[in-house]
Image (tube, rainbow, N blue to C red):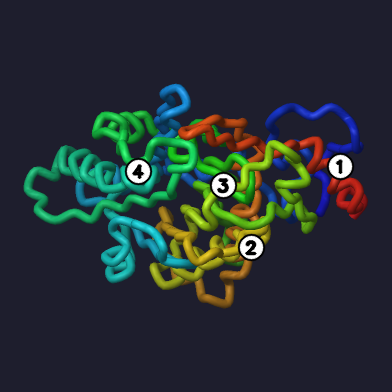
Amino acid sequence: MRLCAGQSRVAGMPIGPSSRARDLGLAPGGGTPGPTNSIVDVPSVRVGQVSLHEGTRLHTGVTAIVPDTVDRAGGRLPAGLFVGNGYGKLVGATQLVELGEIETPILLTGTLSAFRAADALVSYVLALPGNERVESLNPVVGETNDGHLSDIRSRPITEEHVLEALRTATSAPVAQGCVGAGTGTAALGFKGGIGSASRQVDLGDRGSCTVGVLVQSNFSGTLTVAGVPIDAQEALGADADHAVPRGNSCMLVVAVDAGLDARQLRRVAARAVFGMARVGSDFAQGSGDYAIAFDVGAASDIPDTKLNPIFFAAQEATEEALLDSLFLATTTQGADGHVKHAVPLDFVIEKCAMAGVFDR
């Protein structure tokens, strides 16, 4: 683990309530991030989010990942899916695997709202100019279960929420933490959320590309930062919540602009799921862990022997995105008196300092 260039970290110094891992000197690996260190660093990829809060009853939302190519009539992009564990309701999965492509933006939301979100996504795409005669469409909607902090049975996501997320999608830096589809999620004993990171990749004689990752974290295990376990019980003491069911899922979306084909993209997606292990996922049987990778670049003939830099970047960006999804989240009180506390970053820094992380 290396400190970011020009930064230092001393145990005991004041730390804000939420910070990106990179700002704390805890960015994983030595790869170079893009300008915003998020998925929108991949050209022509935009993100839109809508967050819903209603007292302590509702904390949920929608996150839309919108590549320009599929935001117009007839648009398709090569894509691959890797399933770490299939305990989930990923709408559109079988056609994505069969044809190796996506033909709509990708939505993320809460489990029982996935089907309403899919219907709204179909309405959005059918209404695009030039799609007046379309009779078949494969919406792609991922989900995690935010029922610990939100009234999931009320299925609060409406068509208007989905349309707002799609229509406001932008290439501005991605909001992270308790936003969009991560508004009510929890992960590794703490409040989870949306996270995003990117890496610029040198492909040698093949040029360069960008790998961007966006995550919706909502899974169990022991948070691990730079190889140091951060036990929620020890970190939170009496505030630790033991009522969270094991599992509950993670959605990972990877964007690339290298011109990879669907088979290669499935291999990239697998590396994103592998990246979950770096932050301490226990891959519980009740966790639906899915990664979708798509490529916005012109088709190329990059051989598999040249894919290692992309594989490494996907794992590293996934790790950083997952850390940021927790580090930027805030304590949230939810339905039935449940509370999920943010990661105490001063505790993380102290533990990492004691383990010698900042001297490595």
Measured Cα–Cα span from mark 2 to mark 4: 32 Å
- Badge 2 marks a residue whose secondary structure is helix
Residue hosting label 1 = 350
The residue under label 1 is which amino acid type?
Glu
Q: Residue at x 56, y 47 (%)?
A: 243
Three-letter amino acid code at the position of disc 3: Ala
Residue at mark 2 to residue at mark 3: CA–CA distance? 23 Å
Residue position marked by numbered label 3 in the rendering: 243
Is residue 83 toward the left or the right of residue 102 in the image?
Answer: right
Q: Which residue is mark 2?
A: 277
Q: Earlier in the sequence, mark 2 or mark 4?
A: 4
Task: Give the quarter of the figure containing the N terminus.
Answer: bottom right
**Position above or below: 88 against 11:** below
Q: Secondary structure at mark 4?
A: helix
Residue in the foreground of this view, choosing between 276 and 44? 276
The amino acid type, in three-letter code, at marker 4 is Asp
- Residue picked out by circle 4: 68
